[in-house]
Image (cartoon, rainbow, N blue to C red):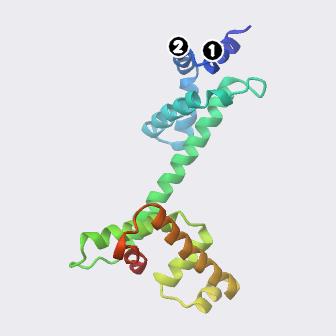
Amino acid sequence: MNPDDELAERFRAGDEQALRLAYDRYGGAVLYLGVRLLGNRADAEDVTQTTFVAAWQGRGTFDPERGGMLGWLLGIARRKAVDRLRSAAREERVATTVRAQPVADEESPERVLDRLVVADELAQLPAEQRRSLELAFYDDLTHPQIAALTGLPLGTVKSHIRRGMANLRRRWEVDGAASGSRSAGPLRAL
């Protein structure tokens, strides 16, 4: 049995020393991939750590017949880097949305918080629903205007807005944010 196969077998069996050996052997390659994908060493180091944590927790899914341990680890690292990029993009969209909203001097901290929550929730909707809701609420366009602007059929625009509002409401309730009168507050902030 070659050393890589032996390491993989020990890793799958839950040998913590094998985890350390795997990190020593493959950590540099995982870090290199992270730096190449993210362009930032600090983020790449975080991705490297989360890759090995995820690999350890999911070690039972590693199948040496489908490929080597390095390829498996690099696949995990790639997914973790993509997750990091998506998260950063979502945070940037939220920040952009918040910066674009005029803030009155008398606006309460709760209202600002509501705007942040709504912006974050909007960022998690499918793009077509998000775009339709933004045009309806931020730009104050009617359904026919949105249809003309986007080129979508009027019924599709109405469906996107209805589904988007339902998704927001569901997420708002599931996240525990809806309590009493606050449940309608952020949706009015749109």
Mark 1 surroundings: few (<14), some (14-19) or many (≥20) residues within 10 A: some
Give the structural element (helix, strand or loop) at label 1.
helix
Q: In the rendering, which numbered label is found on residue 188?
A: none
Q: Say whether residue 150 is visible.
A: no
Which residue lies under the disc numbered 2? Answer: 17
Q: Quadrant of the N terminus?
A: top right
Q: Quadrant of residue 51?
A: top right
Q: Nearer the viewer, residue 84 or 19?
A: 19
Q: Give coordinates of residue 64: x percent, y percent.
A: 74, 23
Is 133 rendered above or below residue 96? below
How many numbered marks, from 0 up? Answer: 2
SS for callout 2: helix
Check whether the beta carbons of the residues at disc 1 and disc 2 lie within 8 A of each other: yes
Report the residue at 66% width, 18% height from top: 8
Q: Residue at x 67, y 24 (%)?
A: 69
Q: Residue at x 56, y 30 (%)?
A: 57
Pointer 2: residues within 10 angstroms few (<14), some, or many (20+)?
A: few
* 125 sits left or right of 151 in the view: left
Mark closest to the chain's N terminus, 1 or 2: 1
Q: Nearer the viewer, residue 159 or 46?
A: 159
Residue wearing tag 1 = 10
Considering only vertical position in the picture, is 103 above or below 141? Answer: above
Please provide percent x and percent y for residue 97: 42, 70
Tag 1: amino acid: Arg
Residue 129, percent from left and from top: 59, 73
For the question of whether residue 179 can be seen, the reply is: yes
Q: For the residue marked with disc 2, what is the amino acid?
A: Gln
Residue 47 falls left or right of residue 64: left
Alpha carbons under labels 1 and 2: distance apart: 8 Å
Estimate the x, y position of residue 109 in percent, counting from the top left: 25, 69
Among the 4 quarters of the image, the one containing residue 190: bottom left
Q: Residue at x 73, y 26 (%)?
A: 63
